Image: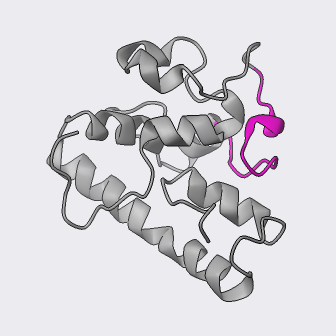
């Protein structure tokens, strides 16, 4: 892990996120995982058949839109065609693209509004409260298991 921007303080590593269960187990379907350390995938919750499985998500709920929807909304850059998590994995390993890093870190910071909603409206550790928001912030490296 290389030095992070001081404003970017993810609570989970990519490996931890994959082990907890994110994106229905299909984020890297089609071979995208090959550029990343094999150790990240040893205990990862990955779909065996490449279909989205909400049961693989930590909160057992679908909390993300499709890649096609992300593309339509302009959230995808040419640098990371799979989206934010791909950017984070590459950033974590040391890749730096200043403009893209600033854009993605700003998007990450915007997720704090969801963290605030969880902490204001849920008892700590109540995994039945705001499960969709909890899963969504988990996709953004916030440890919603501690909220």
Left or right of 129: which side holds 91? left
Residue 92 to residue 122: above or below: above
Residue in the foreground of this view, choosing between 96 and 75: 96
Q: Residue at x 19, y 65 (%)?
A: 6
Q: Which residue occupies the extreme bottom position in the image?
A: 120
The segment highlighted magenta reads 51-66
53 on left or right of 133: right
Residue 91 at x, y = what percent? 27, 40
Of the pair 17 and 31, the residue shown nearer to us: 17
Which residue is found at the position 59% from the left and 35% from the top?
19
Q: Position of residue 23 (x, y in %)?
A: 65, 39
- Seen in the picture, residue 49 relative to 45 is either above or below; the reply is above
**Whether residue 83 is visible:** no
Question: Residue 121, located in which quarter of the rendered image?
Answer: bottom right
User: Could you tell me what secondary structure mostly forms the magenta stretch?
Assistant: loop
Q: Quadrant of the N terminus?
A: top left
Q: Position of residue 68 (x, y in %)?
A: 63, 36
Q: Is residue 72 left or right of residue 93?
A: right
Residue drawn at x 77%, y 70% is: 130
The structure residue drawn at horizontal position 32% and vertical position 62%, both measured from the top left corner, is: 9
Q: Is residue 54 magenta?
A: yes
């Amino acid at each position: 892990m290389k030095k992070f921007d001081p404003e970017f303080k993810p609570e989970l590593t990519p490996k931890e996120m994959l082990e907890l269960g994110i994106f229905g187990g299909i984020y890297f379907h089609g071979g995208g995982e090959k550029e990343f350390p094999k150790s990240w995938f040893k205990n990862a919750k990955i779909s065996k058949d490449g279909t989205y499985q909400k049961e693989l998500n930590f909160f057992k709920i679908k909390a993300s839109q499709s890649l096609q929807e992300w593309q339509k909304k302009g959230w995808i850059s040419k640098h990371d065609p799979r989206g934010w998590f791909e950017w984070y994995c590459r950033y974590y390993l040391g890749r730096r693209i200043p403009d893209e890093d600033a854009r993605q870190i700003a998007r990450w910071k915007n997720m704090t509004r969801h963290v605030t909603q969880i902490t204001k409206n849920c008892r700590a550790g109540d995994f039945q409260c705001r499960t969709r928001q909890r899963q969504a912030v988990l996709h953004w490296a916030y440890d919603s298991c501690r909220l």
